[in-house]
Image (cartoon, rainbow, N blue to C red):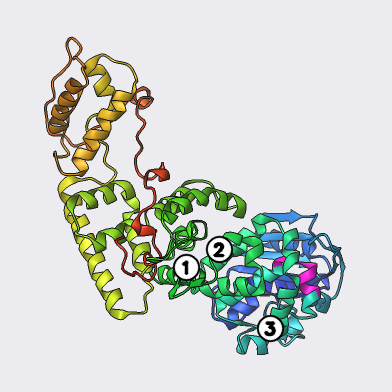
Amino acid sequence: MPLSNPIFRQISRLADEQGVRAFVVGGYVRDYYLRRPSTDIDVVVVGSGIALAEALGRELKTRVSIFKTFGTAMVRAHGIEVEFVGARKESYTHDSRKPEVSPGTLEDDQRRRDFTINAMAWSLNGATFGELVDPFDGMSDLEECIIRTPCDPDVTFSDDPLRMMRAVRFAAQLGFTIEEETFDAIARNAERIRIVSRERIAVELNKIVASPVPSIGFELLEMTGLLRLIFPEMHNLKGVERRGKHAHKDNFIHTLKVLDNVARRSDDLWLRWAAILHDIGKPLTKAYDPRVGWTFHGHEVVGSKMVPAIFRQLKLPLNEHMKFVQKLVFLHLRPIILSEDLVTDSAVRRLLFEAGDDVEALMTLCEADITSGIDAKVKRYLANFELVRRKMKDLEERDRIRNFQPPITGEIIMQTYGIGPCRVIGEIKEVIKNAILDGEIPNEYGAAYALMERLAAERGLVKAEGAEGGEGTETGAERTESGTEAAEAGDNTGAGVEEPAAVGGSEAGSEAGAGDMGTKSSRG
């Protein structure tokens, strides 16, 4: 039953005592009919919303947050938030989405709402408690799953262009269709999105990415012309070029398939962003070879280098989330290469080492990247990926490679040979690391120390007086590396994907690759 929460009766009594009309309006009403949970309640008062909020706060003995600039007040109680605002009408200037506001009627307030499904209201006053006020027939649009503006859509979107993003977002979240005239108005007013802050656009974009079928939203952004304005790098994936018998797939469509595949498997927003960006480097690496057709050599390297600039442009966080997406874009071809070739222990160790704790996310992305329409090919790749997973589990249990640090640190080398930071330290550490990853020596201190001694002797290093010998069988993961920052000055090698350029271009970047899984030898 709507309005069953006791707080609504309290607001009703207080509104009647103050002699004002009050209504629940917007998303709470919409979500009730959609059977979606909601704890955010908007109350419109034909009068002072702040005065009614203060009265409720006194009765509930709870703090009231007042925002006089906006004429709103917030009351939080019993796990819900109630925002009060006076009914108003708005007018806009052409160069701003900040309106001129003046007091208005309930219908004025409903008319300024973005869509009919968000303009429905329930009366809170005693005599009409719970009655639906729906002047723009939002209930019919809700039943028919339609997104439509309550008045002229050109005015709605020109006044506040962010509403165009919200239309797409609601379509993606709810699986609704944007009504034809509303859709056409978005296309006509798309350029107006330029006056909206990147931060506000990012909020809506992330909600589209997090929706059940995010491809719906991105297809609508592309069709309305919004995508080329807010995210041109993704727009540039669209299209097919043909020369003779050779044509490449539409990488925009492929990316949306991968994104939906990931969305079916995971709610992780940043894994979804990794899906969006996994092939973002393809337009910049596209080349035609008459012998083999279209290639995209090194697109994973170029794409990973594009990630920070794209996050900065879209006002996405430049923190560990960005680094996670960058790593997955850089590595997204590696499991595919493994699944096509003989799965060697060495190759799997390197994958575990470079992916670290993100290896499961990487495998999810790579499995989602199989978008071929040929069932036999899909089954073959999935079976090979399962083989890679089993090999990873076996090696992880045996060698403890994931996130390992080689047992010999820069500090140990300096202390043993009485030298300061220099390039040779990095060279020795790199050889030891590769020997462990290639299975030439176990991931143990004693074996690594012995290899260090041989490498140092080859380079003419002599042990310092009193230097300890190498004993024990601790792995690098078990040793605590302390005080090694000075040694790192002489270590020009990296771990993981901090230096994408080290990969270079490979056959893995060819068009037959990470999408349709052709004949090449090849992961928000």
Q: Is residue 112 visible?
A: no
Q: Is residue 353 above or below residue 230?
A: above
Q: Is residue 470 above or below residue 177?
A: above
Q: CA distance from mark 2 to mark 1?
A: 9 Å
Q: Helix, strand, or loop for circle 2?
A: helix
| Residue at horizontal 23 percent and vertical 29 percent from the top | 408
Q: Which mark is residue 130?
A: 3
Crowdedness near tag 1: few (<14), some (14–19) or many (≥20) residues, C-alpha within 10 Å: many
Q: CA distance from mark 2 to mark 3?
A: 46 Å
Residue at the far top in the pictured view: 465
What amino acid is found at the position of numbered circle 2 in the picture?
A: Met
| Rendering coords of residue 93 (x, y %) | 86, 63
- Residue 160 falls inside the magenta stretch: yes
Q: In this rendered view, identify the residue nearer to me: 243 or 184.
A: 243
| Rendering coords of residue 429 (x, y %) | 26, 31
Q: Is residue 71 visible?
A: yes
Crowdedness near tag 3: few (<14), some (14–19) or many (≥20) residues, C-alpha within 10 Å: some
| Rendering coords of residue 481 (x, y %) | 29, 30
| Residue at horizontal 20 percent and vertical 50 percent from the top | 396
Q: Which mark is residue 255?
A: 1
Circles 2 and 1, Cβ within 8 Å, touching? The answer is yes
Q: Which region is colored magenta?
A: 155-162
Whichever of labels 2 and 3 marks the residue nearer the N terminus, that label is 3
Whichever of labels 2 and 1 marks the residue nearer the N terminus, that label is 2
Q: In this rendered view, identify the residue nearer to me: 47 or 217.
A: 217
Q: Helix, strand, or loop for circle 3?
A: loop
What residue is shown with label 2? 234
Numbered disc in front, either 1 or 3: 1
Whichever of labels 1 and 3 marks the residue nearer the N terminus, that label is 3
